[in-house]
Amino acid sequence: MEDQGQGRFRKEISLLDMTLVGVGAIIGSGWLFASGLVASIAGPAGWISWLIGGIALLLLGLVYAELGAAFPRAGGLVRYPLYSHGPLVGYLMSFITVIAFSSIVGIEVLAVRQYATSWWPALSQPDGQAPTVLGWFVQFGLLIVFFLLNYWSVKIFAKSNTIITLFKYIVPALIIIVLLSQLKGANFRVEGFAPFGIAGITTAITTGGIMFAYLGLQPIMGLAGEVKNPQRNVPIALIASTILSAIIYVLLQVAFIGSIPTDRIGGSWAGVADEFSLPYYDIATILGFGWLAFLVTADAVVSPSGTGNIFMSTSSRVVFGWARNGTLFRVFGRVNPATGIPRPALWLTLGLSIFWTLPFPSWNALVTVVSSALIFTYAVAPISAYALRRNAPDMPRPFYLKGIGLIGPLAFVVASLILYWAGWQTLSWLLGVQLLMFVVYLLVKNWVPTDRVSLAQQVKSSWWLVAYYAVMLVLSYLGSFDGINLLKSPWDQILVALVSVGVYYWGGRTGLAQPIVDEDEVEEEEPAEAVTAR
């Protein structure tokens, strides 16, 4: 049980609440900024980038659906690697996930402040990016509001999110309807349909903010331990929120590209991101829809706020899961018995979120790094699922994913490619830090848990991950995405795909012979019929 004598989580979140948590997490600040960046990188073909990102998310979501239904745990994202490969892999995934999640909270308040500057210019410096002292304190106040909404009750969190998410649907729907009425076919022929080729379409997925915009499934997994009938509701919420969000994002990108006055493109898409730094606000203003510009600004405050609220909650569950894994201070693994909230973990999340608002001036400054960190946290799930299929074949799986033999490796390959497209500058420090954390773990081996899995076995079950880090670093340095271009496209990406297939099977076959999920940790739940993906 999620207990430890310190209280347990309460199952108060419904299927509708959970689906709206997923949609609310995905529809955050990403759509408010990314459309302009995507258009400048991929041109009229930008909607294809959104479609590829949606397919990638759905593949990973299907794998998560099996894991989430089998293990409805708070902070499940960082606990599945522990179950399948032991504390060392769980530790590495926990570290990068906490960094990624807590920074999202900071990014969302940055987005709120940047858009709100159109109403209150004193919030930002003249460049519109960096905050003034007043602007930073407004960001800080928002973080405190998110903290308090999560501090008192999970029911208060869920219901407040439901109200916010419904509003977040209305404004994008209005934008799509209005801008599609202004569609100009000539825009889709400026510089050709894909002026920057396949490289532009793929690069936009990471550097254009698409994966940052999409990666909102983790909150569903983070709150899985607090959902009514999780075996049924978790997989349904995962799949439904992914499909709904993909439809919205593709339509928003098409509407943005088609509605720009053709003369404002200036014969090249490369400058669109600068011309439309606040894409939908700027386009509504140019087209004379003042009322729509007002709604966009209002939603630009509400949408990121809702996502920040969700990730404040989810990040605390990830911290909780890390503590439960035994490789973080156990005080963060406690749940308040009166409220069912992991309050120590929530306090740490608040501190980290504040930190992420300090050194970085704008939304764009963080989004590529965070996108890469997020996709990296997703990528290990297919390998965990494969290892558990091999080593725990009789484990109850209320949601049994048919075709995992194809979907699993495909999901890992797609995630690896998206990670690779981020480029050498991002991967060099992101994966480098992970290698450093591996060394730190071995140096402090007297502090790490070895009661259930020996250190030798933990290392043996993690070599595939260390090798993956190292090979991805080499390929990124030699490749065509910010590397020295010794490996030309598409051969560099073919190599990434081949390496990923090899790592997938290596990682799956070196999982623990006996997964370390304790019998008394399995949540008791009302019987639910198994759901099978077809």
Image: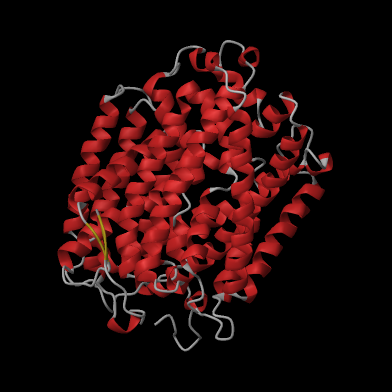
Q: Which image quadrant for residue 305?
A: bottom right
Residue that appears at 75% across and 39% down: 294
- Residue 368 percent across, percent down from the top left: 51, 39
Name the residue: 76% across, 37% down: 291
Placement of 134 over or under 310, stated as above or below: above
Picture coordinates of residue 528, whole percent (x, y): 32, 74
Q: In this view, does 58 lie to the left or right of 459?
A: right
User: Could one spot residue 206 in this view of the protein?
Assistant: yes
Q: Nearer the viewer, residue 468 or 185?
A: 185
Give the vertical position of 268 relative to 305 (above or below).
Answer: above
Q: Quadrant of residue 481?
A: top left
Q: Which colour scheme is used?
A: secondary structure
Q: Can residue 79 be seen in this view?
A: no
Give the x, y percent position of residue 25. 53, 54
Residue in front for this viewpoint, 389 or 448: 389
Image quarter where the N terminus lies is bottom left
The residue at 24%/50% (across/down) is 408
Relative placement, left or right, of 225 versus 532 is right
- In the image, 15 versus 383, the foreground residue is 15
